[in-house]
Amino acid sequence: MASKFKMTKQEKVELKAKIAEKKHEWAEEDRQSDLEAKRALEELKEQLGPSMQTLNALIEDASSDPTNVSKKNALIEFRKGHEKLLQKIRIEKDRLSLTRKLERWSKRGSRLRRELFIKRQYYYLVAPYTLLFIVFTVLPVLMSLLISFSYFNLLEFPRFVGWENYMRLFVDDKVFTIAIRNTLILAVVTGPLSYIAAFVFAWLINEIGNKWLRSFMTLIFYAPSISGNVYLVWRLIFSSDIYGYANAFLIRYGFIFEPITWLADPTYIIWIIMIVQLWLSLGVSFLAFIAGLQSVDRTLYESAAVDGIKNRWQELWFITLPQMKPQLLFGAVIQITSSLAVAEVATQIAGFPSIQYAGHTIVTHLVDYGALRLEMGYASAIATILFLLMIGANLLIRRVLRRVGS
Amino acid sequence: MNLDEEKLVSNELSKKEKKLAASQKKKMKKYAIRDESTMGKLELYLYRLEKKRKIKKRKRVSRSKLGDLSLFTVLLLFGLFSAYPLLFTIFAAFKPLDEIFLFPPRLFVENPTLNNFYDLANLMEQSWVPFSRYFFNTIFITLAGTIGHVFIASMAAYPLAKHNFPGKKLIFGLVVYSLMFAPQVTATPNYIIFSVIGLLDSPLAIIVPAFAFSLGLYLMKQFMEQIPMELIESAKIDGANEFKIYWTVVMPLVKPAWLTLIILLFQRLWTTDGGTYIYSEQLKPLSYSLHQIIAQGVARAGTSSAVLLIMMVVPITVFILSQSQIIETMAHSGMK
């Protein structure tokens, strides 16, 4: 079959020549029709007399004078002709417009071109968002990939250095090893925990019968994630003197005898960050779960009760979870991404840089090099690794979650 | 002749019948039931949505009392854990200084005062840049960013949700992938891009990228998929162009989704501190100056809790007002 469509070299050359000829022909045609339209437009414009406003004014003048009806009628007659002329001019202008040119272009090509033209309004609507999205998200990712292979300090032109940045990261940079370790610990603990917590609390809240109580509990659990900087309160709670709530509580009930310097002791810092992160983590995915639970078809539960499902656990496992798979997937994406990006909480709670880098994560390392030391090449290498880590984790978990229940 | 007929009609209804009709009308009003045959297409669609929402949930099956009790205890316990810091912030804002440094510390306030807020007002007057300027910056960034985002994202979401065109899958696929990494990844190159475009050290450096917030587009698009195609088709037959359909047909229908986009982005922008993109003092947002007040430590403990309260109250109020609508949007958030 394939040989049937194969062309000899000469044939190819001939075809190309033909195509070029056709294109030339079209160009000539377009030029001719444009010229024609322009000429017609100019002719019409010459015929055009006084402007519409002056005509209207004249007619008004004439109508105020009741003795001269014939003049008024003649003027109105003239205006009709004038309007026709204006209409013709509009048509000629339209022939010259960009849309017509695009239409001509769309008719001379594959089916795709035609489709692009017919559906052009959709592209107008999508264009602003897509443009911004490309400039501020797609382009930066590609740029950071490119810059990561160079030495770039914002002053000189970037210099290509190959894999040097990555080698430095993994071989020389001891702090980066700590950062990776901390990030992974945080992600492995807070990611699954917050995911499960979001689902469990959503499910428990959905079990509440009273509507008002339900929305109140939703507010209580969701509020931390939208209340902005309130997590700074945790600094007071874990303050290192006896006025800190954690210390005061422990001293009062005799667990310890002198205050613990919570935020200055490397053994505690990461756990405190975890607690705060968990406190903050019931966000969008939590809401998605609540909504998902509410939209599960209620008749399913009733028919299941008839079929022999005895308690809420069986109901959860056999009906609710499979029904909620789309929300579960969405929640996983949000939760994984946020648990790998712990940074602001770490810097606000533990300081920057934290003691013995106990609260140092990949993102804080990135901020260190990107915003403070201005080693853009190196920072981009960190960003690229973070990017790959996040996308990899997400795709992996998505694959696992998709298998559940099938 | 005509008059007589009307009289006849009015006479036909006896008192009893009139009463019946009135009571029926009352009932209809009580259950918000309306005559479906007289409604237009759009009205009917909205009415049915409303009706669906109003249908009460039937009683749950297979529940044990003991199970209920133990589960709610768990919920209550964690609820306290979740609410404690919030309550703490609220009470701390009204505590006089001597109560803040009480040992052992207490959660509740005994002699509530507004002193912390007065101190904050005094501090505002003294600061180098007028404090109201920080407020203004934050409000400007938040409002401009959210409004622009809702407008631009929903405009893009409409064709992505309801129409097919070449490149649609690519665009939406990229948006979904962008949900999978945090914005910090793109911070460094973004700095370079801003400096090239000339957005550095201007509120636009925060506002313009916020327009392209990908979670918003994702949620909006998922929500729009449920709009019946007939509504759009009938508007098209009436001769509306796509922009007009988007503005007059689609936008009024996706009000819950707007609110969701607003709360999500609002909360993000409200807490932004300008990062490395804004370095002029007079352009810094509120969150930045808050960090500075808190950094002054013990001496400003009362004032900083007053600021924390102000920062917290606004997004939470927005959420309370729009909760049910947000949940409705989230029901469509699922991924395949």
Image: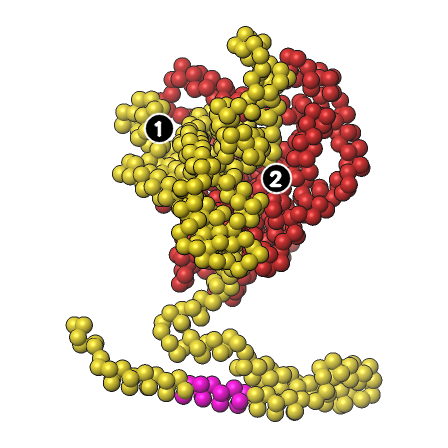
Chain colours: A yellow, B red
In whole angstroms, how far apart are the C-alphas of marks 2 and 1?
Answer: 37 Å
Judge the density around disc 2: few (<14), some (14-19), many (≥20) Cα neighbours within 10 Å.
Answer: many
Q: Which residue is found at the position 57% from the left and 42% from the top?
A: B268
Q: Residue at left 16%, top 72%? A: A1
Query: x%, y% of residue A311?
Result: 33, 22
Q: Residue at x 40, y 42 (%)?
A: A170
Q: Is residue B125 visible?
A: yes
Residue B217, horizontal then vertical, whole percent: 49, 50
Q: Which residues are magenta?
A: A25-37
Horizontally, is B7 left or right of A376 in the view?
right
Disc 2 and disc 1 on one polypeptide chain: no
Q: Is residue A130 above or below residue A81?
A: above
Q: Residue at x 40, y 72 (%)?
A: A114
Occupied quadrant, residue B322 = top right
x then y, percent, for residue A363: 49, 40
Give the letter of the chain under mark 2: B
In which quadrant of the rendered image does the C terminus of chain B lie? Answer: top left
Near mark 1 (Cα within 10 A), the count class, few <14, some 14-19 or many ≥20, is: some
Type of the residue with mark 1: Leu
Q: Is residue A62 left or right of residue B49?
A: right
Most foreground residue, A406 or B284: B284
Q: Which mark is residue A316?
A: 1
Residue A49 in the figure: left or right of residue B332? right
Is A26 part of what is drawn in magenta?
yes
Q: Can you tell which of label 2 and label 1 is closer to the viewer?
A: 2
Q: Which residue is mark 2?
A: B271
Q: Chain of mark 1?
A: A
* Residue A254 on the magenta span: no
- The dominant secondary structure in magenta is helix
Q: Amino acid at mark 2?
A: Thr
Count of numbered marks:
2
